[in-house]
Image (cartoon, grey):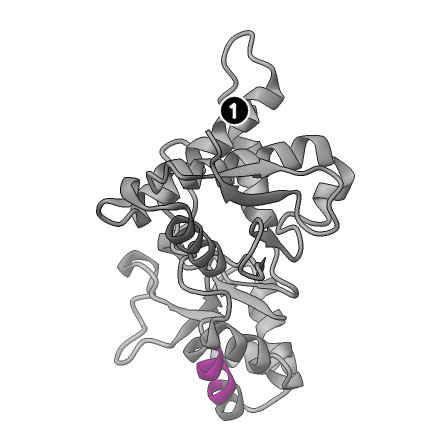
Amino acid sequence: MIGVKRLRSSERFVPIDWRYHAWVEGILDASAVTAVATLSDPVRRALFETVRRAPAASTREQAAAAVGISRKLAAFHLDKLVAVGLLELHSPSPEAVRPRHVGRRPKLYRVAEPGVQVSIPPRRTLLLAELLLAAVTRTRSGEDPAVTAMRIGHERGRAVGEKEAPARSRRMGPERALTLVRLLLERLGYVPLHSGTGPVQFRSCPFDPLSVAAPDVVCRLHHAYVSGIIEGLQLTSVHATLVPGSAGCCVELGPRTS
């Protein structure tokens, strides 16, 4: 299974206000797959590395000279890299343009930010890193850092659920509620295992392999995140349970019994 997602600059995470991220689009982004495949060409890969390592935006002439190809061929490949989102055109400020430059300004290329993220199989270590960073920077006086992480994870999950909550979700029975959560988690990159009976489990941990290094912290944080999603969806008939030592993910979903 392949999980590929391009992160656009408008989707950068803001830990302080939990701005909603736009990962709810499915785990396979065809444009990102195309971007990665573009680098299989050795000339394009060399041009990309040249622009990436340059101290400033590069012209076609500079990139061509560094790689040892013609300007025309460099222009073709550079524009291909722009088309797939790996590079972007840079327009210098008017003050930076020399007076003797008349007519059409030369094209300048630089690496597009924040770039393309690829995960095979799908992993969400960027989310985990953001949650832990927020926990470090937002620990309350006298609060245990692990407790802060659980609180932050729950807040983030609730923000996601609130953006996706349908009308009258509080009235949903367990079956419909479980389906709603499962479908949302699938769109977030999870791989649920559900035969139609019993709890909803997940094939693998989205925070692996870091969860193996510190399962007590990561699994509890993950549980808080999923619980926050359920709360944000305003579902009262289901809940997330922490199941340490399970073969796949340590969090599973099931009907609320009380």
Q: Position of residue 148 (x, y in %)?
A: 54, 22
Q: How far from the left and from the top, in percent, is residue 236?
A: 37, 36
Report if residue 216 lies within the magenta region: no
Q: Is residue 190 left or right of residue 91?
A: right
Can residue 15 be seen here? The reply is no
Identify the residue at image location x=44%, y=82%: 79
Q: For this rendering, which residue is in front, 154 or 257?
A: 257
244 sits to left or right of 38: right
Q: Residue furthest left?
A: 167
Q: Quadrant of residue 44?
A: bottom right
**Residue at image mark 1:** 137
Of 235 and 191, nearer the camera is 235
Say which amino acid is labelled 1. Answer: Thr
Q: In this view of the protein, can residue 60 be seen by the observer?
A: yes
In the image, the segment drawn in magenta is 75-81
Q: Nearer the viewer, residue 197 or 10?
A: 197
Residue 195, percent from left and from top: 58, 62
Q: Label 1: how many residues lie within 10 Å, few (<14), some (14-19) or many (20+)? A: few
SS majority, magenta: helix
Q: Identify the image quadrant of residue 89.
A: bottom left
Vertical side of 162 occupied by 205: above or below: below
Label tally: 1
Q: Position of residue 23 (x, y in %)?
A: 43, 57
Residue name at image x 55 percent, y 67 percent? 4
Instruction: Single out the residue that lies furthest toward the top.
Output: 142
Q: Residue at x 48, y 57 (%)?
A: 114
Q: Is residue 72 above or below residue 11?
A: below
Q: Quadrant of the N terminus?
A: bottom right
Indicate whether 44 appears above or below 91. below
**Secondary structure type for disc 1:** helix
